[in-house]
Amino acid sequence: MQNQSRWGLLLLLAGAGVHAADIELGATNLLPECHSIGWVSAWVKAEPQARGQGWDGILDEVKWGTPSPQQMVARNWDWAFTDEQWRAAVKQKGEGKREEVKCELWLPGDCPQVRGLVVMSGHGSGEALFRRADLRALARELHLALFKFTGNPMQRGFWPKSLLYEQLKIFGQKSGHPELEHAPLFLYGHSNGTGFSALFPATEGARVWAWVSMRPGTTFQVYQPGAAQVPGLVIFGEDDPFLARPSKAENLAVVPALRKKHCAVWNYAVEPKTGHGPGEKSWPLVLSFLRHTFVARVPAEAAARRGPVPLKALVMEKGLLGQNWDATKGGYQVLAVAPFADFAGDKATASWLINAAYAADWQAFQRDGEIKKSR
């Protein structure tokens, strides 16, 4: 695929000489719509009789895995097709119109070598997250780079997955940090940006240390058995209309279903009295999850300049379990948390929490709606 790019480089002084100049890179590419998840869903993933039709909006009440009679295809986002099949569909249907995709990179100027990348779809709240001072402070501490993309061909998810790696290689060359091509990834997607953050690790899990879905637009995007062994956090807003469509019970059943059927190392949280957009109290839980999964999964001696970094495997029994939020009660809830062996509830469906420090933050978030001091 051909594309056109405009490169810009801005060196930012951070803190009156306390830090070396930070690096910010930007590129605007023209990409065809055939890269977008919507196009792929309509023309590649769907069965021949359903291609080009939209989803009818009907799901089953608390029956994950059983499609409604009206929709036998789009419900299942556990996609199993090849890049060759995608290319064949592009050849048949054409690339579609070209649209701008803007990619941005930020990394601390005093970072000798990037140890990991926080990659976020700019869809919804991702744009603001990319520029948050607390995220950049954490990135400086852990030697992380931040990478964001916006534009319809990518921001809700994209195909093929190599499209991201191609962009990271280019940015690695431009920034003087070639390790970006192989650095481990942490993924963030808000609303339909979950089409990126949840789908990507389903096939690229060896590269991803953890992922977040913030207020998924459609929870069947989260149903990704292939991503079960990559730590995942799904955050719902109690008053989000998307959570109530068609019912809170069905949408909140997704993570427990993956826990039970696929031993997923996932957890979910419900932020009381909030809607579809995250607020200031949402971010500390995301940053806590980022920090603790990074320490647990990325080896201290990792050097991405030598190639892909083998991530540390997780042992289910070494984590903690948390009682899931009860939709019938609503609001702030005191949820039991205990080491795996000591948990008194249903171990198969409880939220899996990576360590005691993160578990304490998760519990405080559900009890108080905020984390006053992340551990």
Image (cartoon, grey):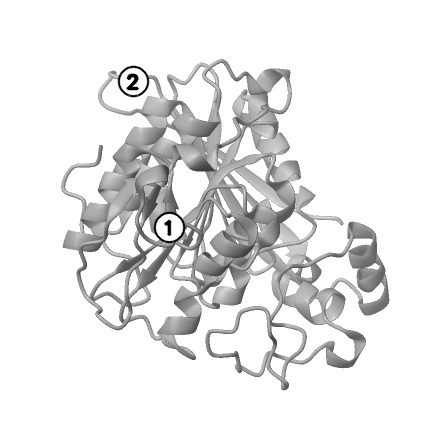
- Res. 216 mark: none
Task: State how many labels appear.
Answer: 2
300 vs 292: above or below: above
306 vs 166: above or below: above
Query: Secondary structure under badge 1?
Result: strand
Residue to which mark 1 is pinned: 351
44 vs 322: above or below: below
- Which image quadrant is residue 140 in? top left
Q: Answer yes or no: is residue 198 visible.
A: yes
- For the point 28% across and 25% down, which residue is it? 14
Q: Would residue 113 be found to the left or right of residue 359 on screen? A: right
Residue type for callout 1: Ser
Q: Position of residue 8 (x, y in %)?
A: 50, 36
Front residue of this view, candidates 332 and 316: 316
* Label whose residue precedes the other's in the sequence (2 or 1): 2
- For the point 69% across and 71% down, which residue is it? 42
Q: Position of residue 55 (x, y in %)?
A: 59, 78
Query: Secondary structure under badge 2?
Result: loop
Quarter occupied by the C terminus = top left
Residue to which mark 2 is pinned: 19
Q: Would residue 196 be found to the left or right of residue 306 on screen? A: left
Q: Which of labels 2 and 1 is toward the front?
A: 1
Q: Position of residue 13 (x, y in %)?
A: 31, 24
Front residue of this view, candidates 320 and 159: 320
| Marks 2 and 1, how far apart at CA | 39 Å
